[in-house]
Amino acid sequence: MINFQRTKYLREDIPIEVIVGDIKFFASEENEESLNNQINKMYSFGGGWQPFEGFTMNRETKSLKYPEDPELFPLAVAKFRNQEIYIYNYAWVSIVEEDGSFEVARID
């Protein structure tokens, strides 16, 4: 299970469980596969982990920006081995590698 923490961008009156949903059950430390692969398998009914191109990420705030869309700030974060996973509004999820590279997918 992935242990998410709220970020300063999540309003206090919104329970973190509402934002995280079932994503916390999509990966296990006991499984040696990467977070992306585990989510892909566990979310196969919803299309799996399908990276969406075109986002940029602010390295300091971890906010996402897609051309002509408003900036999205992370509402929840978790550390999973050497990766970090962020959850945003509109079911966007990013996985950030140690080297700063990242992928974004929609997990709803």
Image: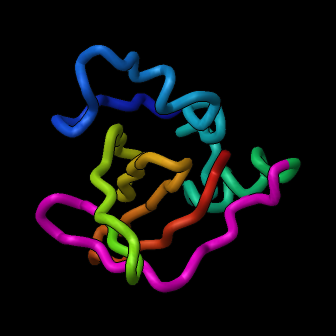
Q: Position of residue 103 (x, y in %)?
A: 48, 72
What's the magenta bit mostly, secondary-structure-wise?
loop
Going 33% across and 79% down the picture, which residue do you hit?
A: 56
Quadrant of the rendering where the C terminus is positioned: top right
How many tags in the picture? 0
Q: Position of residue 26 (x, y in %)?
A: 65, 39
Tell me which colouring the rendered structure shows: rainbow
Quadrant of the rendered image containing residue 60: bottom left
In magenta segment, residue 50:
yes
Q: Is residue 18 above or below residue 31?
A: above
Pick the front one: 7 or 36: 7
Going 28% across and 77% down the picture, which residue do you hit?
A: 99
Q: Is residue 74 above or below residue 11?
A: below
- The magenta region covers 46-63
In this view, the residue farthest toward the left is 60
Q: Position of residue 13 (x, y in %)?
A: 29, 14
Pick the front one: 80 or 14: 14
In magenta segment, residue 69:
no
- Relative placement, left or right, of 104 versus 86 is right
Quadrant of the rendering where the N terminus is positioned: top right
- Relative placement, left or right, of 42 versus 79 is right
Q: Is residue 105 above or below residue 6?
A: below
In this view, the residue farthest toward the right is 45
Q: Is residue 76 above or below residue 1?
A: below
Going 29% across and 73% down the picture, which residue do you hit?
A: 57
Pick the front one: 79 or 87: 87
Going 29% across and 64% down the picture, which residue do you hit?
A: 71
Q: Position of residue 46 (x, y in %)?
A: 81, 50
